[in-house]
Image: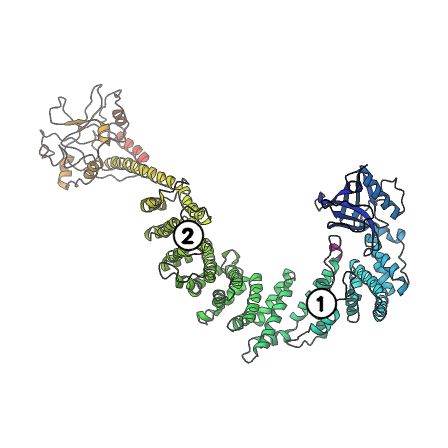
Amino acid sequence: MADTSTRRRVKLYMLNEDRQWDDRGTGHVSSAYVERLKGMSLLVRSETDGIKLEKDLGEEQGSLLLESRILPDTAYQKQQETLIVWSEGENYDLALSFQEKTGCDEIWEKICNVQGKDPSVEITQDIIEESEDERFEEMPEVAHPIDLPTCDLGKLAEISELFSSVLGSPVRREKLATAVEQDGYIRKLLDLFHMCEDLENIHGLHYLYDIVKSLFLLNKNVLFDIMFQEDTIFDIIGVLEFDPSHMTPVKHREFLQKSAKFKEVIPFSNQELVNKIHQTFRVQYIQDVILPTPSVFDENMMSSLTSFIYFNKVEIVSMVQDDEKFLLQLFASITSEKKDEDARRDLVLFLKEFCTFSQILQPQSKESFFKTLSGFGVLPAIEFILQQDDAKMKCAAIDIFSYVVDFSPSMVREFIVKEGQSQDDDDLLINLVIEQMINDPDPEMGGAVQLMGIIRLLIDPENMIAVLTKTEKTEFLSFFYKHSMHVLTAPLFAVTAEDKPSKDDFQTAQLLSLILELLSFCVEHHTYNIKNYIISKDLLRRVLVLLRSRHTFLLLCALRFMRKIIGLKEEFYNRYIIKGNLFKPVVEAFKVNGNKYNLLNSAMIELFEYVRLEGIKSLCNHIVETHMTDLEHVDYVNTFDSLKATYEQDRVKDKTAGFEGYVINAALSLRNNRFRRDPRAMDDDEEMWFDQDDDGDDGENIVPMSDVIRSSDMELSKLIAEPRRTAKEVDDLKDSPPRIINKTNSPINISLKSSQLTSPLNSPERPNSPTSPICQSPRTPTGSCPTPASSPVTTPSANNAIHGKRPGIGLVDYPDEDSDEEEEDETSENIGPSPKRQRIAT
C-alpha cells in the first residue's frame, strides 16, 4: 500500500482567462481547520525533498500553494477518480489532480462530510446554468432575505461566520448588503468595537476585523457611503488596526490625526470641497496601506473601492476648476516677485498634484481642464518657475509642463512662437526647458531624459495637426532652428572644438547622447531645416569627433547619427560626406576597435554593408578609392571584398557604357550633320557607301567596320576635335554630289579615303585626312574626295559589314526626291528629333 505522502501528492491547476488550465505547482494536500478562515479548509503545500507529510501532522514543510475554505454552498465535482474541480469565487476555477485514487477518495470524503453529502455522489451541489442576471430576477421568489444575528459580543463569532460564508455567492452578497444597510448594522458593529477596545477584548477585536474586511469584499458602494462618512471612517480604520496576523495593533488613527497634516496653500471657500479632499485621502490610505494586498480571489471584489476613489478625484478636480477666484489667486501668487520661496514651492506642488489628478479625466473633461489652466496662464507660470533657483520647484514645474505638452503640443507651440516676437532667445520657454535639460544635476540624467521626450514631442511633425493655422509645421520648425537649435547643440560644439572630446566624463557623455538622439530624430523627420543646419555648421564632422570618446554608448550614438544621414540616400548629403572625407573618423575608430566582437564593430560593419546593399555608388567609390587600404585586411566578413568587387564591376560597366555611348553619339552626330539633300542622295535607312574607283588605285585605304569600332580612345578623342569647315568649303562641297557605287558580292568595306567625312572617325593626323596633301581641294577631279550619303553605324547594311555578310542586292539610285523626304521623316521618328545641319565639306 502506498504511503500517505504518495497518496496525497497532487498537481494544482487554475483556469486562466483563455479557458486553459495553468499548472500552479506540485505539492501535498491536506484538510485541516484554519483559525483565520474559521472553518475546514483544503491546504496544498509545495513538495519538499525528503519530507513525507503524514495525516494531521503538526508542522508541514514547503510554501503554501492553496488555502481554500470548504464552503457549504460550493459545488465540488469529482472526475475520472483522481480529479476534484470547483469554482473559487466568481471567476476562478481550480482543480486538484491526484497521483493516486486513494488520496482523491480521502479528500473527497472530507469535503462531503463538511457539506453533509454522501461521498458516493459525483457532485456536491446542483449547478445553476442560468446567468447571473436571471438569478437576480428570480431572487425575490427563491432567495429569502438574510436574518442578521443580534449585534452583541456573544454573537461576534456567528456574525463573522455568516459574513464569510456569503462571499462566494453573488445573490447572497447582495442580500447581505441590503440587510446591513437597512438595519443600520455598521453603526451597531462600531459600537461593539468601542466596547471591545475599552475592555481590551482582543478576540472580539479580531472577529470585528474579519467582519469589516468582509464588508469591503461585499463590494457595495452603498456600504462605502456609510463607512466613509466623517463620523464613522476613523472607527472603521480603528477596527482595521487589529489585524490577527499582527502581534500588536498598528496605530493608523494616530498617524492620520496627528502626523498627516492638511495644508491649505490658499484657503478654500468651499467646505464641501475640503471634506471631499479629506475623505479621498483617508480612503486612499485604507486601500494602499491598511488593507492587505488582495489575492487573486479578492482583487475583483475591490473594484467598487477603486471606483469610489476615482469619482472622488474627478469631483475634486471639477470643484477646483470651477473656482475661478481660487485659480486666479493661485497663479498670481506663483508669479509674484514678493512671494516667499517656501510658500511659492507649496503652491507649485499643489498645482502639480492638481494636474496629476486631472490625468484620470475623460478626454472631453481633460480638454476643458487644460483650456482653463491655459486661460489663467499656466505656461507663463512654468516659464517663471524655471527661472528660479529652487531645484525641487523646477522639477515640479517640469512635471506640470509634461502634462500640458502631452495633452496639447500645438497649444504650447503657439505660445512659444507668439512670445518669440517680443522676448529674447534666453527667456523663451523652449530654451529654458533645453537649459534645464543641459544643466540637470542628476548624475543619471533622469530629469534630462524626461525633458528630451518633451522636446521631441514639440518638434515632432507627426503631431503638428494644423487646425487653427495651416502653417504650424513650417512656422514652428523655422522658429526652432532660428532661435533654439543653437542652444540645444551648444554643449556638443563646446566639447568637439578639437580633434577629440575636451570633456569626457560620464554625465557629459549622457547629455551628449540625449542631444544626438534629438538630432537623429531631426534628420529623420525634418527636411531642409536640419539639412541646411548640418551643412552650414559642419555638424556631422563635429559629431564624429565623439568617436574618440571612451564611452562606447556615445560612440554608438554618433555612429547612429551618421547612419540616419546615409539612410536618407540623398546625394546632397553624400557629396557633403565625400568632400569632407567624413568616413575617415569612422575608419579610424574601426581600426582602434580592432577585431573585437562587440556592438560597435557590428554597427560599423552594418554601415558599410548598407552602402553596398543599397548601391550608393558615390559613397562606395569614395570608400574604395580612399579607405580600402585600411579595410582590405578585414576577412571575417565579406563586406569590404564585396564593396571592392562592386566598385570594379561599376568601373568596367562605366567604361564599356561610356565607349558604346561615345560611338553611338558619334554616329548620331554623323546622321544629324548631313549635307543638304541631293536628289540622288541615298536614304538614311540604307547602306552608306564611300566613293571609290573600281581599280582601287586612287590611294584609298579600305578598312573593315570591325576595325573602325576597335579604334583607340585617343584616336576617337582626336577625331572629335576636328575643326569645323569654313562656309566657303561648305558651299564648294554642295556642287560635288556624292557617288554611289554598286559592288558585287564581295565583303562590304568602308573606304576611309583622303577625303574622309566629318565624323569622329576622321583624325587630322591620319593619312588621307582633310589636311593631307592628297586632298587639297574638294573640287579637284583627280583628288577624289567623296562624301558620305548616310551614317555608317546605324544602317542595316553596316551591321552586315561588321559580321562579314554579303548584301543580297546592290544599291540603286532613287531619283525621286519626294521618296527621299518621306524616308528621312520616318528615320527621324526612330532616332528622335534633330535639326538638319549643313554637311561640312571635305
Question: In the rendered image, which quarter is residue 635 located in?
Answer: top left
Give the image location of residue 84, x and y in percent.
80, 42
Give the overall secondary structure of the magenta segment: loop
Q: Disc 2 residue type?
A: Met
Q: Disc 1 residue type?
A: Thr
Q: Is residue 815 visible?
A: no
Task: Check the image and name the residue furthest to the bottom.
Answer: 338
Residue 299 in magenta stretch: yes
* Towards the viewer: 423 or 535: 535
790 above or below 243? above
Q: CA distance from mark 1 to mark 2?
A: 53 Å
Q: Answer with left or right where residue 203 lies relative to residue 526.
A: right
* Towards the viewer: 82 or 334: 82
Magenta-colored span: 293-301
| Mark 1 secondary-structure assignment | helix
Give the image location of residue 641, x and y in percent.
37, 39
- Check disc 2 and report the residue beneath it: 562
> Going from the N terminus, do you reach mark 1 or mark 2 first?
1
Question: In the rendered image, which quarter is residue 356 located in?
Answer: bottom right
725 above or below 153? above
- Check disc 1 and report the residue beneath it: 280
CA neighbours of label 2 inside 10 A, class few (<14), some (14 to 19), many (20+): many
Q: Answer with left or right where residue 411 lies relative to residue 110.
A: left
Residue at 13% x, 21% y: name it.
Answer: 695
Question: What scheme was used to colour the molecule?
Answer: rainbow
Q: Answer with left or right where residue 397 lies relative to residue 56.
A: left
Give the image location of residue 482, x and y in percent.
42, 64
Give the image location of residue 549, x and y in percent.
41, 57
Q: Is residue 255 visible?
A: yes
Figure quadrant of the N terminus: top right
